[in-house]
Amino acid sequence: MINLLKTLTALSLATFLTTPSFAGDPEVIHSWNMDVDPGWTMTGEWEWGQPLGLGGDLFGLPDPLGGYSGDSAMGMNQAGDYSTEVGGPYELRTQAIDCSTITDTQLRFHRWLNIDWQGWVFSYIEVSNNGVDWTQLWTNGSDGEIVESAWTEHTYDISEVADGESTVYIRWTYEVAVAAWAYSGWNIDDVEILGTVVECVGDLNGDGMVNGADVGLMLAEWGPCRNCAADLNHDGEISGADLGLLLSSWGGC
């Protein structure tokens, strides 16, 4: 019992945030359908508006005629190809996104992309929880050009960076090097943040509080347990991971 109580006091919110949740399929928590300008940071040729189906005259294919849903999207020079003038990196960066009550966080969006490959144009998708340190989710690579003639859906797991964080940023960037060829570039629509909302985890007796009474109920079921209420991470065992989840919601709900 003493060792279990020591475990309880040692565990923290960090344990909760790194423990997988199995509460069901992630749901859409935040979304931007680009029908209106979301007011994100844009540098270089990034812009919001209606892509006009232009570009791709020499390399790649044209932009779409409109967004994936609706008329508008985010893109690079929606009236044609991007400039091959050396420069960047140029970014499309979201405002701060509140993921403080979310686990299993994912980024999902639709893209229509025509771009040169690395060595000439460098492009990345990155995530940050402070706007300073960035984790790469995707890059265009050096294996060849990317040429698309339709909208495609893409999903990225950002849980390690975003779960439980109140200031999450996503950015799409590009940088043009010497001797790049002109393509029609990025088009992005229907950006979504998905996840599982955590609400009062650990209130095992349903009294609106997470306290010692709930700890007692959890300790009573300690060890292997099938379909037990105290198995908060649904891994078939009551353990220190479940204590960490309970501790993260300590107090009133």
Image (cartoon, grey):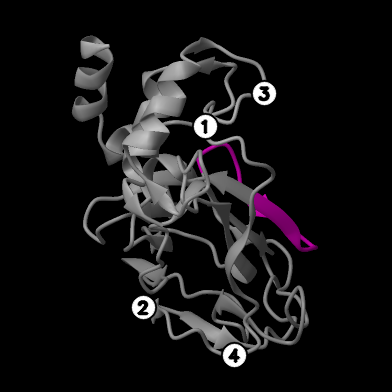
Q: Position of residue 241 (x, y in %)?
A: 40, 24
Asked if the residue under mark 4 is in contact with the one under mark 2, i.e. CB atoms within 8 Å, the reply is: no
Closer to the N terminus: mark 2 or mark 4? 4
Q: Callout 4: helix, strand or loop?
A: loop
34 or 9, nearer to the observer = 9
How far apart in space, not on screen, are marks 3 and 4 (Cα)?
45 Å
> What residue would you read off at disc 3?
227
**Any mark on residue 43, and which?**
2
The local crowd at label 2, few if under 14, some if 14 to 19, many if 20 or more residues have their Cα within 10 Å, is some
The local crowd at label 3, few if under 14, some if 14 to 19, many if 20 or more residues have their Cα within 10 Å, is few
Closer to the N terminus: mark 3 or mark 1? 3
How far apart in space, not on screen, are marks 1 and 4 (Cα)?
40 Å
Front label number (1 vs 4)? 1
How far apart in space, not on screen, are marks 3 and 1 (Cα)?
10 Å
The local crowd at label 4, few if under 14, some if 14 to 19, many if 20 or more residues have their Cα within 10 Å, is few
**Any mark on residue 180, and which?**
none
Closer to the N terminus: mark 2 or mark 3? 2
Residue at the location (60% across, 67% down)? 191
The local crowd at label 1, few if under 14, some if 14 to 19, many if 20 or more residues have their Cα within 10 Å, is many
Residue at the location (68% across, 83% down)? 51
> What residue would you read off at disc 1?
232
Q: Position of residue 90 (x, y in %)?
A: 36, 69
